[in-house]
Image: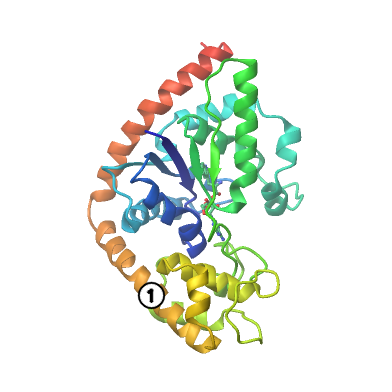
Amino acid sequence: MERVLSGIQPTGAVTLGNYIGAMQRFVQMQEEADCYFCVVNMHALTIPQDPELLKQRTIDLVAIYLATGLDPAKSTIFVQSQVPAHAEAAWLLQCVARVGELNRMVQFKEKGKGSESVLAGLYTYPVLMAADILLYNPKRVPVGEDQKQHLELTREIAERFNRDYAEIFTLPEPYIGEVGARIMGLDNPTKKMSKSADSEFNYITLLDEPKKIEKKLKRAVTDSENVIRFDPVAKPGISNLLNIYSSLSGKSIKELEKQYEGLGYGQFKKDLIEVTIDHLAPIQSRFHEIRNSGEVEQVLKQGREKAAAVADETLKRIKDAMGII
Ligand code: TYM
């Protein structure tokens, strides 16, 4: 069976961007592939974190994985730090990656803004991500558009290792959806929706209450044309809302354009609010149930063992090829 791996950082609320770009597709993929999904808590340390909050958010994210429908009988769900091979492989692969490659990473440039006080971990972050991936030799990595460059670097590292040391790694393909690969900010649809945005009107989180969802979607930026048509350049706001609507309802954008022919933004937003609240309600109630049970600990114990069995084996081969006793 084909192998798949992906991860999400526990750095705050999970947004609709994370959900539509990544998680919703994790749930689909577990039906057809041998899936590994991790919470990448060591990546979170690349920007300063409150230790207690980081612990809590790590567990919450596992509970959200389960609440969205990931099934531990089908997918291996684990926390990055609980499989020490990730940190070890990251070091070894830092001795394969080149500074020229890391210098080109757009996300580092955007987040680091050239500041001297940026943590060194933020710079080497893509290599830890390459380790996360390559230890499992997955064929596909489901991610949003913003991770594409990190995947390209992962492939370069894998290719170089295969050539210079030993043919160990499968070259992973990014698996990016046609709809929803880049959900934009509600308050500024020319930039991606992000949990680190300045205003909470930028995003909807999976745990937002109905009233809040309504308020945020009502305020979402549109345009003055009052026509529901998909055109990301001329109509970024409406096109983004169409993407969200399509992803949450399962209707295609074409179908939605047809459904709203002759209707205005008022009706469209009203329906989108309802679709969003209805989609998130069962996830939210499952989240609270799971969080109050001992389920997360159990899932992680099993996940850690399964993940480590695969990762340790690959790590052994990497070390052997590099001459590390
Ligand atoms: P992170 O935690 O920032 O985001 C998790 C996933 O959500 C996707 N995403 C989006 N998709 C569509 N629209 C958006 N606005 C949006 N915002 C976020 C991201 O593309 C991602 O798929 N470096 C990664 C985490 C990581 C990882 C890995 C991923 C670490 N190791 C191994 C895959 C495989 C990150 O920071 O994602």
> Which sits in the foreground, 41 or 152?
152
- Where is residue 226 drawn, in percent x and y? 61, 87
Query: In the image, is residue 25 above or below residue 162?
Result: below
- The reply to whether residue 187 is visible in this rendering is no
Rendered image quadrant of residue 77:
top left
Query: In the image, is residue 67 above or below residue 211?
Result: above
**Amino acid at pointer 1:** Ile
Tell me: is circle 1 under 8 Å from ligand 1.
no
Q: Residue at x 66, y 75 (%)?
A: 235
Residue pointed to by mark 1: 277
| Quadrant where the N terminus is found in the figure | top left
In this rendering, would 214 be left or right of 126?
A: left
Query: In the image, is residue 322 above or below residue 293?
Result: above
Rendered image quadrant of residue 129:
top right
- Where is residue 97 drawn, in percent x and y? 67, 29
- Where is residue 153 drawn, in percent x and y? 64, 36
Label 1 secondary element? helix
> Which sits in the foreground, 315 or 220?
220
In this rendering, would 77 be left or right of 259?
A: left
